[in-house]
Image (cartoon, helix red, strand yellow):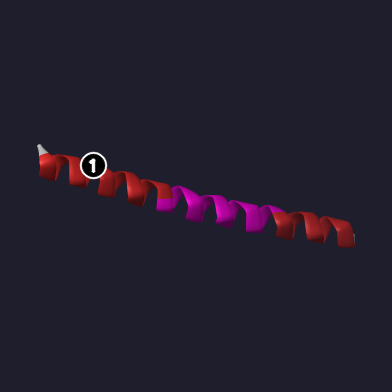
């Protein structure tokens, strides 16, 4: 019972963490694209 709750909580934390990482990657990629387009 308790281990199930811990597993669900861990899954939620990992999902949130991955979402934040992906968002940061997308933003930095967008920023690099913007810099490249400014140079071009």
Question: Is residue 11 rendered to the left or right of residue 38?
Answer: right
The secondary structure type at the circle numbered 1 is helix
Magenta residue span: 11-24
Question: Is residue 16 rendered to the left or right of residue 10?
Answer: left
The image position of residue 16, as x and y in percent, is: 57, 57
Residue 28 colored in magenta in the image = no
**Badge 1 density bin: few <14, some 14–19, many ≥20, Cα 10 Å:** few
Corner quadrant of residue 33 = top left
The image position of residue 24, as x and y in percent, is: 42, 53
- Magenta segment main secondary structure: helix
Label 1 sits on residue: 33
Question: Is residue 11 rendered to the left or right of residue 3?
Answer: left
Residue 22 colored in magenta in the image = yes
Q: Nearer the viewer, residue 9 or 25?
A: 25
Q: Nearer the viewer, residue 1 or 10?
A: 10
Task: Please give the name of the residue rendered at 49% of the width and 51% of the height, measured from the top-left corner.
Answer: 21
The image position of residue 30, as x and y in percent, is: 28, 46
């Amino acid at each position: 019972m308790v281990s199930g709750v811990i597993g669900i909580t861990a899954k939620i934390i990992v999902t949130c963490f991955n979402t934040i990482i992906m968002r940061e990657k997308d933003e930095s990629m967008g920023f690099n694209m913007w810099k490249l387009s400014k140079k071009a």
